[in-house]
Amino acid sequence: MNNTEMQLNPVLRIRIADQYGKTVAIPVNQQAKWLAEIAQTKTLTPHAIKVARQMGFMVEYVQPVLPEEFA
């Protein structure tokens, strides 16, 4: 791996969704997925997001894109 491949994008892209009546933060980009993997979860907890911010990550919330037939 060279230095370009190892650079980490400091932005976590997260989509907020409702699953079975519970609000969850779903990781969208690779960095957010890696954080969830480290936390051994499929979604990110508020605590994990808070710690990521303290580590210098920026959090970007992404809206789901509706397929044309639903728009």
Image (tube, rainbow, N blue to C red):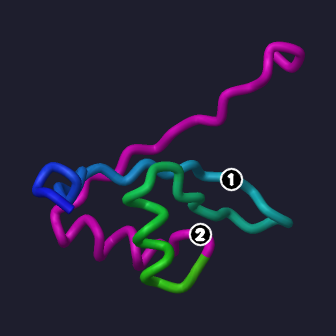
Label count reads 2
Looking at the image, the residue that sits furthest to the bottom is: 40
Looking at the image, the residue that sits furthest to the right is: 69
Could you tell me residue 25's position as x and y percent? Answer: 57, 61
- Among the 4 quarters of the image, the one containing residue 64: top right
Question: As displayed, is residue 69 above or below residue 23?
Answer: above
Q: Amino acid at mark 1?
A: Ala
Quadrant of the snapshot with the C terminus? top right
Residue at screen point 18% across, 71% down: 55
Looking at the image, the residue that sits furthest to the left is: 3
Residue at screen point 59% across, 58% down: 26
Number of residues whose C-alpha sits closer than 10 Å to that of mark 2, classed few (under 14), some (14–19) or many (20 or more): many
- Magenta region: 42-71
Magenta highlight on residue 44: yes
Say which mark, if any, is on residue 43.
2
Could you tell me residue 23's position as x and y percent? Answer: 67, 63
Judge left or right: residue 37 versus residue 24. Answer: left
Question: As displayed, is residue 25 above or below residue 15?
Answer: below
Sequence-first disc among 2 and 1: 1
Query: Which residue corresponds to mark 1?
Result: 17
Quadrant of the snapshot with the N terminus? bottom left
- Among the 4 quarters of the image, the one containing residue 47: bottom left
How far, Cα to Cα, is label 2 from label 1? Answer: 10 Å
Q: Which element is circle 1 on?
A: strand
Q: Amino acid at mark 2?
A: Thr
Question: As displayed, is residue 17 above or below residue 60?
Answer: below
Question: As displayed, is residue 34 above or below residue 6?
Answer: below
